Image (cartoon, helix red, strand yellow):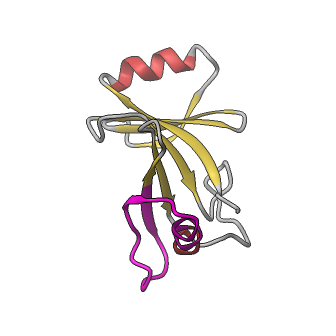
Amino acid sequence: MELGAFSVSLAVKDLAASRQFYEKFGFKAFMGDSKKWLILKNGDHVIGLFQGMFEKNIMTFNPGWDQNAKKLASYTDVRELQKQLKAQGVKLVQEADESTTGPASFVAVDPDGNTILFDQHV
C-alpha cells in the first residue's frame, strides 16, 4: 500500500514560537502562509505547524506526493486507499467522495485516538 509523503501535523498555539523552536533542530520553512500554517523540513523529515486549524496532532499521508511536495509519476489514488482500508474493516470518521477524481481526503482514527489524515492534493 503506497501512502505517499508522510508528515506530522502539529496543532500549535503560537506559530512563530513553534517555528523558532523547530528551527533550532535544523528545520527550515518549506511552504505555508506564515500566519496560520507552515510546513518545515529537515532533510526528508517534514513537520506541519497549524495554528487554530485543528485540536490535536495528526499523522498525515499525502498520496501522489513525494517528501518535497512534488507529484509522483505513479501513485495510489486516495479513493483506492480508502476502499482498501474499508475492506479491511478500518472505520473512517470522514470519507472521500469515491465518485470524484483529483484532490480529496479521508480520516481514520487508530485504537488509541490518534488521527490519521490521508490528504491528496493532486
Decide whether residue 85 is among the magenta residues: yes
Above or below, comparing residue 46 to residue 24 in the picture: below
> Viewed as shown, does residue 36 lie left or right of 6?
left
| Residue extending farthest bottom | 99
Magenta residue check for 50: no
| Left or right of 11 in this view: 78 | right
**Residue at the (48%, 58%) spot, across then down:** 119
Question: Residue, x 26% and y 35% (percent of image)?
Answer: 52
Report how many numbered discs are placed on residues in the image: 0
Which is more toward the observer, 71 or 2?
2
The N terminus lies in which quarter of the figure?
Answer: bottom right
The image shows residue 41 at horizontal and vertical percentages of 61, 34
Name the spot of residue 42 as percent of width and height, x first: 66, 30
Q: Give coordinates of residue 2: x percent, y percent.
A: 70, 61
Q: Relative to the observer, which residue lies in front, 13 or 30?
A: 13
- Relative to residue 71, is residue 100 drawn left or right? left
**Where is the C terminus found, in terms of image quarters?**
bottom right
Q: Is residue 72 left or right of residue 9?
A: right
**Which residue is more in the foreground, 112 or 43?**
112
* Front-lying residue, 113 or 39: 113
Classify 26 as above or below 119: above
Q: Tell me which segment is drawn in magenta.
A: 82-107
In the displayed image of the protein, which residue is found farthest to the front?
Answer: 89
The percent coordinates of residue 107 (x first, y second) are 42, 56
**Residue at 65% across / 71% down in the picture?**
76
